[in-house]
Structures are given as structure tokens and as C-alpha cells.
Image (cartoon, rainbow, N blue to C red):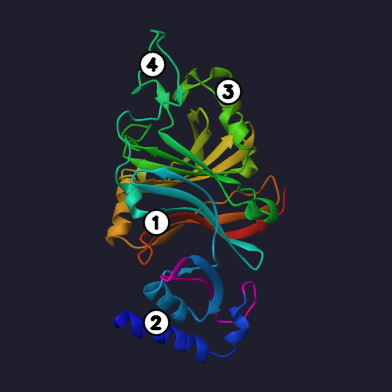
Amino acid sequence: MRTIVLAFAAIAALLLAPTAASSLEPGHGGPPGRVPVCLVTEGAPDLEHTIEVPPVVAKVLTQVTLSYTGACAEYGESAPRGDGTLTAYSQVWQDEPQAVGLVFPSETLEGLPHDPPTAGLWCFDKDGNGEVDPMMECAGGYEDALQLGEEFRTQVDSPFTYVLNNWNPHGHMPPGIYDKPHFDVHFYMNPNEERLAIRPGPCDALVNCDDYVLGKNLPDEQFLHPDFEDLNAIEPAMGNHLADLTSPEHNGEPFTHTFIYGTWDGEVTFYEPMVTHDWYADLASGSIGDSCFPIEQPEAFAESGWFPTEYCLRYRENRDELTTSLESFEFHEAS
């Protein structure tokens, strides 16, 4: 009964608000003080429609229906993982990106593979004994490469084209820091074919030694924030990972989530939030709340387009799903 009353209250507020009718068309600029919300009902869960409403109405809608904040998403590719799925998505409002993200139901956190620690896609017999040790001679965890929707990739002036999620049941290097079960959520800007061409081999982080040289070719300083340093974390089918040594996990605090800049052969190629399984589980349980965290910005950008300034970790209780997203985009001209 309470749900029905709240739903009617939301509808009444929408109908009584000034110029409500004119703001119901997707893409309409609308009057000040309104926000986009994707209207979804339990009766038609696959039918999504963007409307503009006062913030209080948006809040009620996300509590009593299957609606979610922001413009309706364009969904990209999905893949099974754990007891659920992973899906790439993007949100665009008035020709500007609101979010590029990965969404999955909380059941994805259950039934995840644990042993062996990787899917065995990127292995190298480093000791030359004729056998591959799945614990020591394989990299990459369990990966799912998911294309973003075609409309976003072709019509939005932003470099992101796909999401590569890596589930790492035992974490990874360096030991004592990132060796917790966690997800690496890579948002890639270079072609998938280029990523896949980074071969396994005997050099640091189990990468081909010729490719290691390419990974050590860093972008010019103005394209990187000075807090991010090269730790020789060049991995096959990924690239180099630059870590912020001022972040909590590098200063005596436990790793919960962090941000990584990815590079390859002189270019910034991916943005990567890394998030522990425990953090997602605590979001789903309500032990912690939704949060956004700043992405340290470089002085300049090598190409023009929309780039994010935050990454956000959220749980949509009404939909029982978790999101990891890049948000708060700003447009930059190439320097």
C-alpha cells in the first residue's frame, strides 16, 4: 500500500509541476530545476523512457519503480559472469555524455571462478619446463570485453569504445597491496585489436619483451598527472598500468578501490577503476553508500573530446544492480 501511495504522489507531483507536459519529451532542454530520469515500471521492465522532473519526483520514482537517475542508457554487449551478467552501458543527455559504465546484478558477485586464478588466456612457460603453471605463469584473471553501444561509439565525441572487466580472484601484484579479490574495470580508448596484440612473454608482469619496450614508451608528461608513476605493470592483452602513489593503499591503508591510468606505446589508452569484491558487497548490503571519486586530471589531452573527471560506484536498490561508471565529463581540445 505504501508503494502505491508513493507512486501516486510522484505522479501527482509530476502532473502538478509547471510545464510538466513540455518536459516529457526525451532530449527536451526543459526548465531549470529539473533533472533527467529514466522511467521504468515493473509492468514493462524492458521499456525505458527519459523524462525531466523535479529532483524530489526523480527520487521517489527511483524508490517505488524500476526507474534510475539520468537519461536512459544505451546498452552495449553483455556477458555471463558469476551467477549473473556484466553489461556495458552509456548515458547521454542533450548531446553530452553523462556516464560510461559497467552494470551488473548483485548475484554476479556470487559463483565467481576462484581456482585457477585466471582463465588461462594469457600464459607463458617462463621457466621453460614444458608446462604452464596456472598460479605463476598466467595473467589477466577472468576477462570480459564488452563493446559500448553503437550510437555512443559513432555519434558521441568521446574516445571510449569498450569496457574490459577483469575478475581477479586472488588479486595481483604488488603483493600486500592489490592482492585482494577485486575487479579491474578498464574503459578502453584504443582498438581492441591493438590490445589483443600485446603478447605474453618472460618480461615483467609476464609480457613479451619486445612489447615490454612499447609499454615503457610513456606519453609526454603533459598528458599524465604527475602523481601517477610507472611501476612496470605492463600486462599482456592490456598495456601499462600507472598507479597514483599518493592513494591510500600505497600509504598504509587497505585497498578498497582506486584509479589507474593505462598507457600503450606513447598514448593514454584506458581509464581503470579497481574495486574490491568486498566494496561491491558492502554497497549491495547497504553497509556503505554510493560515492563518486575525483580523477586527477592531466595538464593536456592528446585528442579532442569529452573526458570524465570522476568515477562512481553505486548500488541501485530498486533494481538490485551495481554500477561502476566514469562521469562528470568535460570537453577538451587536443593540445
Question: Is the C-beta separation of discs 4 and 1 under 8 Å?
Answer: no
Q: Secondary structure at mark 3?
A: helix
Q: Earlier in the sequence, mark 2 or mark 4?
A: 2
Question: Is the C-beta separation of discs 1 and 2 under 8 Å?
Answer: no
Judge whether 256 appears above or below 209 on screen. Answer: below
- Residue picked out by circle 3: 211
- Residue with the most extreme front position: 43
Residue 88 image position (x, y, % from top left): 51, 50
- Image point 65% across, 38% down: which residue? 220
Q: Secondary structure at mark 2?
A: helix
Residue 170 bears which disc, if any? none
- Image point 57% across, 91% down: which residue? 18
Judge whether 26 appears above or below 228 on screen. Answer: below
Q: Tell which of 8 and 280 is nearer to you.
A: 8
- Residue picked out by circle 1: 322
Q: Is residue 253 left or right of residue 191?
A: left
- Residue picked out by circle 2: 7
Q: Earlier in the sequence, mark 3 or mark 2?
A: 2
- Tell me which segment is drawn in magenta: 26-45
Residue 132 bears which disc, if any? 4
The N terminus lies in which quarter of the figure?
bottom left
Q: Earlier in the sequence, mark 1 or mark 3?
A: 3
Residue 31 part of the magenta segment: yes
Amino acid type at circle 3 is Asp
Amino acid type at circle 4 is Val
Name the quadrant containing residue 255. top left
Structural distance between the alpha carbons of marks 4 and 1: 35 Å
Residue 42 image position (x, y, % from top left): 41, 70
Judge whether 133 appears above or below 114 on screen. Answer: above
- Judged by depth in the image, the label closer to the viewer, 3 or 2, is 2
